Image (tube, grey):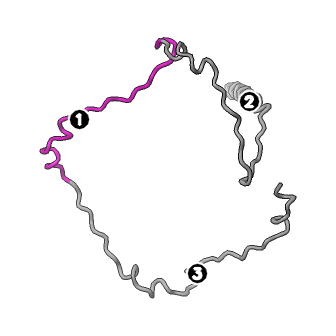
Amino acid sequence: MKTKVLTTVLAVLLSTSASFGANLLKGKNSNFISNLEDAKESTLKIETWMIDESVWNVKLESGFTEDTDQTFEIELWMVHPAYWKNLTTEAEVSLILEKWMTEDSYWNVSKPYLTTEKDKALQIEGWMIDDENWE
């Protein structure tokens, strides 16, 4: 019984979200623009509410809040020399060049497991240069 109810609820939610998504996409066409064309964007229009001071100077209970960055203060431990003198750090091991890294005999080997794959030469086909395909 529990599974049947959950399946029914899931089906209703899925169909609702699908129809909602379809309504959002209705009337929107995506146009393919090749890299040879310039995309033209529609001009933005400034509406009166965008520049109306009364819209932006509202009280906090209306839901608009102005986020401000947290103020940072320098604390004593940040600048106190005793803290930084007693701080222990790990010493990094220096890198060592090993024999295989510098010897040519390790790199100039013609073994099957070291061969690299080469690409075939590009063949230009008719559709690539046909003007009808690129209009």
User: Where does the image place residue 30, in percent across and percent down from the top left?
Assistant: 76, 41
Residue under pointer 1: 74
| Up-down relation of residue 93 to residue 98 (above or below) | above
Q: At numbered mark 3, what does the secondary structure look like: helix, strand or loop? A: loop
Labels 2, 3: front one: 2
Q: Which residues are magenta?
A: 59-88
Residue 115: mark in rendering:
3
Residue situated furthest left in the rendering: 82
Please tell me which residue lies in front, 132 or 1.
132
Please tell me which residue lies in front, 47 or 3.
47
Disc 1 crowd rating (10 Å Cα; few below 14, some 14-19, many 20+) is few
Quadrant containing the C terminus in the rendered view: bottom right
Instruction: Please tell me which residue is depicted at 50% across the width and 86% down the height of the picture.
Output: 108
Q: CA distance from mark 2 to mark 3?
A: 53 Å
Q: Amino acid at mark 1?
A: Ile
User: Where does the image place residue 39, in percent across and percent down from the top left?
Assistant: 71, 45
Residue 59 falls left or right of residue 73: right
| Up-down relation of residue 54 to residue 2 (above or below) | above
User: Where does the image place residue 41, in percent across and percent down from the top left?
Assistant: 70, 38
Residue 39 falls inside the magenta stretch? no
Quadrant containing the N terminus in the rendered view: top right
Q: Amino acid at mark 3?
A: Thr
